[in-house]
Image: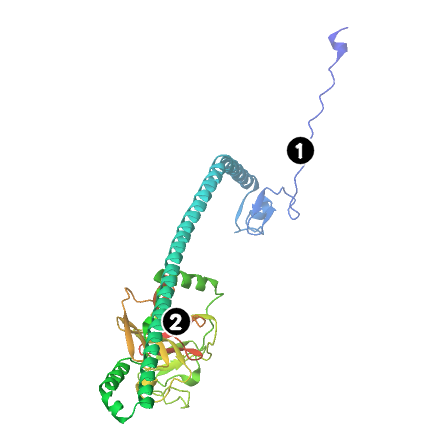
């Protein structure tokens, strides 16, 4: 067969045309640009002079997409690195942290056990020491009483013998015989007069100071404060506030004024001279604690007082700490003291407390002043309080406030 008769082979099929993308509904052109001002794709005609996107922030869509693709790639790489770091942290760091936590917890347990063991041992030693002192004091008082019993039994027997002898002389002797016994009567009488009447002696009383211990007081105060749910909600009775003081609206802050206020209506409850004030409520039983902020004042008194504390006049009767009705901790400049009934006991504080706490145990008849910041007991006073006690306050410089 010749080449002429053969003819050409079949022509290859044409490649399919790419499907046209979305077109601009206004111009019918491909949407190859993006208007960031309107947030939509646009065509080239929209971007030209007179187009709706003239002057807008526009970029070629392909260029913007390529930039976004690059950002996605960078972000994926960062995520991969972050995942690798987390995987390494979980595999290498956390096991070490877990081991250290176990080790530190074990050491902490040992420290707690060691310290509480030391405290327990110290408490047991102090308990034994104090109980021995109490027992020794009891034995001493008991022995003194026994000695007194023997002494007065002998004295009674001697007095009875002298009295019997004198009665016999009186009843059985005639005048001459009685006169002849005058010297003997004198000697017997002198002997009887030599036997003195019983006198009160501290040796016959149990001395409760044998049970006092600074360590025990500190431990007790810490435990007592820890057992309380909080400090008392103490507020000041406005009727008692001195005209030299201003009481805040919430009833907890006292501010000293050198000029006497004329706005205060006088009444039987109000202090009219000394800058004093009483709380609105009193304590009759139980354990009570309250705290006063004193950091702004260099002259103040805080403590407790009986309700019958006099309110009028400039004498000691109404001056806190100078009468039998009040027990106060006071500060004047850099001097601190505890005062009651005109007796002032200086307190050697190393620093000025910003706050002053009071712990009142009416069962034990004990008033304790402490520094809330350190828990240090500043002073302890034991007394037989004769009635309900009111928290009492005085300030002659700046302000003091009850903390709640």
Query: Which residue sits at x=39%, y=71%?
Result: 367
Foreground residue among 342 and 40: 342
- Distance, label 2 to label 1, CA atoms, is 99 Å
Query: Which residue sits at x=25%, y=92%?
Result: 176
Q: Which residue is mark 2?
A: 367
Relative to residue 181, is residue 18 depicted above or below? above
Q: Earlier in the sequence, mark 2 or mark 1?
A: 1
Query: Which residue sits at x=44%, y=48%?
Result: 113
Task: State the image coordinates of residue 269 (x, y, percent, origin top left).
Answer: 42, 87
Foreground residue among 265 and 56: 265
Residue contact between numbered discs 2 and 1, judged by CB atoms under 8 Å: no
Task: State the image coordinates of residue 339 (x, y, percent, origin top left).
Answer: 31, 76
The image quarter containing residue 15 is top right
Q: How many marks?
A: 2
For this view, does 365 lie left or right of residue 77?
A: left
Foreground residue among 183 and 362: 183
| Secondary structure at numbered mark 1 | loop
Q: Which residue is mark 1?
A: 18
């Amino acid at each position: 067969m010749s080449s002429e008769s053969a003819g050409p082979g079949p022509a290859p099929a044409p490649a399919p045309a790419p499907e046209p993308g979305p077109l601009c509904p206004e111009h019918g052109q491909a949407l190859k640009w993006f208007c960031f001002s309107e947030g939509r794709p646009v065509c080239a005609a929209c971007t030209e002079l007179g187009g709706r996107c003239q002057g807008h922030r526009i970029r070629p869509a392909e260029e913007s997409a390529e930039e976004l693709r690059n950002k996605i790639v960078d972000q994926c790489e960062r995520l991969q690195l972050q995942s690798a770091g987390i995987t390494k942290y979980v595999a290498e760091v956390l096991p070490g942290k877990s081991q250290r936590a176990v080790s530190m917890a074990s050491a902490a347990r040992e420290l707690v056990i060691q310290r509480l063991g030391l405290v327990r041992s110290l408490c047991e030693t102090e308990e034994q020491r104090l109980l021995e002192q109490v027992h020794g004091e009891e034995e001493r008082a008991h022995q003194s009483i026994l000695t007194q019993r023997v002494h007065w039994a002998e004295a009674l027997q001697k007095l009875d013998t002298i009295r019997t002898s004198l009665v016999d002389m009186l009843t059985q002797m005639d005048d001459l015989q009685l006169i002849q016994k005058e010297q003997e009567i004198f000697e017997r009488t002198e002997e009887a007069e030599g036997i003195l009447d019983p006198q009160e002696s501290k040796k016959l009383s149990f001395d409760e100071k044998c049970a006092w211990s600074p360590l025990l007081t500190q431990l007790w105060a810490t435990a007592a404060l820890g057992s309380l749910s909080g400090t008392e909600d103490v507020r000041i009775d406005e009727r008692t506030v001195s005209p030299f003081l201003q009481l805040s609206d919430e009833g907890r802050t006292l501010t000293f004024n050198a000029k006497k206020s004329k706005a205060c209506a006088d009444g039987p409850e109000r202090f009219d001279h000394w800058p004093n004030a009483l709380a609105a409520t009193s304590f009759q039983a139980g354990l009570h604690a309250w705290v006063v902020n004193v950091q702004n004042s260099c002259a103040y008194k805080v403590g407790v007082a009986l309700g019958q504390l006099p309110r009028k006049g400039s004498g000691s009767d109404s001056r806190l700490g100078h009468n039998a009705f009040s027990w106060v901790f006071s500060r004047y400049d850099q001097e601190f003291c505890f005062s009651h009934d005109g007796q002032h006991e200086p307190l050697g504080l190393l620093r000025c407390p910003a706050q002053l706490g009071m712990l009142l145990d009416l069962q034990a008849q004990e008033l304790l002043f402490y520094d809330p910041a350190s828990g240090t007991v500043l002073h302890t006073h034991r007394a037989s309080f004769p009635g309900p006690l009111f928290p009492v306050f005085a300030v002659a410089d700046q302000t003091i406030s009850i903390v709640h």
